Amino acid sequence: MALFPLEGPVWQWASTRKLKAEQKAKANAEAANRRATDAQMLEDAERLIAAWNERQTICAPMIFSPTIGAAIAAGYWFLWVRCPACRTINAIDLRTLDRHNDAAVTSLIPALSCWSCRPNAPFAELVRLSRTSIADEMREEHRRRVFEE
């Protein structure tokens, strides 16, 4: 009886190891392809958000809505919302929300009603997605005014 037979578990282990190495190489190639398309996905997300912001500006009917994940990936971290009753505008940081990234931005509307208009607050109106918060925009405008004078 031989100590190491040429058939059985040893050879199965070797072929399994080779199979796993091939699977890993294939997975690495697919990951490289995905990384190559990430730039394309980012560009698509930015175009989608720009189109959505433009439609929001002209008060066009909402026929599509970007996802929270697309907005975060494109760097549009802040969703500006307005209360139709008191006209208060607020910026919501999408990175801090406990929502699925594939959820549409419009799915946030019921949760964003105005605190000062409660208990019968109307639904919030979505103004736009922005790279900056309202406070950052106000600071930038103040700097422009101060340095221009």
Image (cartoon, helix red, strand yellow):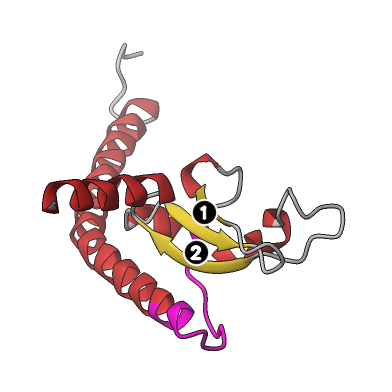
Label 1 crowd bin: few (<14), some (14–19), many (20+), radius 10 Å: some
Mark 1 residue type: Asn
Helix, strand or loop at label 1? It is loop
Drawn side of residue 91 relative to residue 99, left or right: left
**Residue 22 image label:** none
User: Which disc is residue 101 wearing?
Assistant: 1
Q: Is residue 15 magenta?
A: no
Q: Position of residue 47 (x, y in %)?
A: 30, 74
Secondary element type, mark 2: loop
Q: Using the image as rendered, state which of residue 100 and residue 49 is in the foreground.
A: 49
Graded by Cα atoms within 10 Å as few (under 14), some (14 to 19) or many (20 or more), the crowding at tag 2 reads many
Q: Above or below — where is 96 with respect to 114?
A: above
Between discs 2 and 1, the one toward the N terminus? 2
C-alpha separation, residue under disc 2 versus residue under disc 1 = 7 Å
Residue annotated with mark 2: 67
Q: Residue furthest right?
A: 119
60 drawn magenta = yes
**On screen, residue 30 above or below 40:** above
Q: x, y percentage for residue 7?
A: 33, 31
- Give the residue at x 29% y 66%: 41
Q: Nearer the viewer, residue 71 or 145?
A: 145
